[in-house]
């Protein structure tokens, strides 16, 4: 028995050492083995460059500042049109708030790692910092059980959500699962309302719902003007407008992501280096 116990101990991974949260302002959670990898250079844009989402920006910034200062704050679901700056807003607001409250850390959790969230919360709970736990592009398929793990963050179970953690998620779907799956379960289940209640009501556990919608042409052009001004690119306004409109026409869509992609192409043609 002693030899078996020793062999099992050698096979099991060693416990995760206490994270050094002074190593960076942002971290990414990985499993197998569990670890928090510091991110010294976060990929983000300045908050002032996010155009056309003023109401969502102000609401989330106010919520984050309250949380960073030690007061009550809500979990937030940022949902809506793709490419409209949902994840960029979370990262930009963290940078803005962290400059005011140095103890505020950003921790990114991948959707496929949701089953490990309990172990992650145990590490965050005992730390003398405050954490924005961030999950990008959160959604669930018909038979996906990961959503059950998410309740540990939103409701906290018997222990409760750590008071030093708040959860921000982005999704293209307001109810975190495709509408056709919701309607299919309602039409085929013996108890239609009960069949979807557990999954659909998951989004109700977010205190803040912030909607992101396709931008207008004026907002699209304003985004590009902001990027040009921030990086010192000078170009004839009419030429810029014509090229930007042609670019979005070839893409068949208009969004903050398309505006940034056009600006990246423009900067490259102007032989100006930018941080991607």
Image: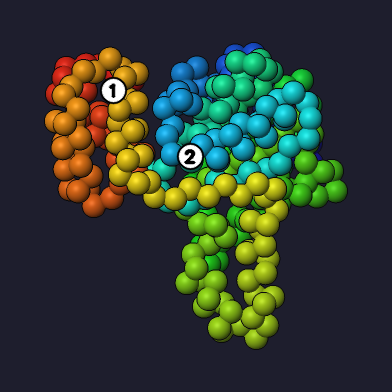
- Asked if residue 1 is positioned above or below residue 98 in the image, the reply reads below
Residue shown at the point (41%, 27%) measured from the top left: 49
Mark sitting on residue 94: none
Displayed quadrant of residue 66: top right
Residue under numbered circle 1: 228
Task: Give the left or right position of residue 83, taking residue 143 as reference.
Answer: left
Mark 2, residues whose alpha carbon is within 10 Å: few (<14), some, or many (≥20)? some
Task: Give the left or right position of residue 127, taking residue 229 as reference.
Answer: right
Of 155 and 253, nearer the camera is 253
Task: Give the left or right position of residue 116, taking residue 227 as reference.
Answer: right
Mark 1, residues whose alpha carbon is within 10 Å: few (<14), some, or many (≥20)? some
Residue shown at the point (65%, 32%) measured from the top left: 62
Of 193 and 3, nearer the camera is 193
Report x, y in % for residue 140. Answer: 53, 58
Q: Earlier in the sequence, mark 2 or mark 1?
A: 2
Q: Which element type, helix, strand or loop, lies under badge 1? A: helix
Displayed quadrant of residue 18: top right
Of 166 and 233, nearer the camera is 233
Of 75 and 38, nearer the camera is 75
**Residue 41 visible in image:** yes
**Real-space CA distance between mark 2 and mark 1, rounded to the nearest whole angstrom:** 19 Å
Q: Are marks 2 and 1 in contact (CB under 8 Å)?
A: no
Report x, y in % for residue 145. Answer: 61, 60
Residue shown at the point (80%, 50%) measured from the top left: 157
- Asked if residue 131 is positioned above or below residue 152 in the image, the reply reads above
What residue occupies the far right of the structure in this picture? Answer: 158
Residue under numbered circle 2: 53
Residue shown at the point (67%, 62%) measured from the top left: 201
Report x, y in % for residue 34. Answer: 61, 33
**Location of the N terminus (image quadrant):** top right
- Asked if residue 178 is positioned above or below residue 256 in the image, the reply reads below
């Amino acid at each position: 028995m002693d030899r078996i116990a020793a062999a099992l101990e050698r096979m099991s991974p060693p416990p995760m050492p206490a994270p050094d949260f002074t190593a960076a302002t942002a971290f990414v959670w990985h499993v197998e083995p569990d670890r928090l990898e510091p991110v010294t250079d976060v990929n983000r844009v300045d908050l002032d460059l996010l155009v056309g989402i003023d109401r969502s920006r102000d609401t989330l910034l106010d919520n984050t500042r309250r949380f960073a200062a030690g007061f009550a704050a809500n979990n937030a679901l940022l949902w809506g049109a793709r490419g409209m700056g949902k994840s960029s807003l979370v990262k930009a607001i963290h940078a803005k708030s962290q400059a005011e409250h140095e103890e505020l850390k950003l921790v990114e959790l991948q959707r496929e790692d949701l089953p490990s969230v309990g172990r992650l919360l145990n590490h965050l709970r005992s730390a003398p910092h405050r954490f924005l736990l961030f999950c990008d592009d959160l959604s669930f398929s018909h038979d996906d059980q990961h959503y059950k793990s998410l309740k540990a963050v939103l409701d906290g179970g018997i222990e409760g959500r750590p008071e030093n953690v708040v959860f921000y998620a982005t999704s293209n779907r307001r109810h975190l699962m495709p509408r056709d799956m919701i309607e299919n379960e309602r039409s085929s289940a013996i108890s239609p309302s009960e069949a979807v209640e557990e999954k659909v009501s998951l989004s109700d556990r977010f205190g803040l719902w912030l909607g992101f919608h396709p931008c207008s042409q004026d907002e699209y052009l304003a985004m590009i003007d902001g990027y040009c001004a921030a990086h010192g690119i000078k170009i004839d306004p009419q030429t810029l407008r014509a090229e930007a409109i042609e670019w979005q026409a070839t893409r068949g869509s208009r969004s903050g992501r398309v505006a940034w992609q056009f600006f990246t192409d423009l900067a490259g043609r102007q032989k100006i280096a930018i941080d991607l």
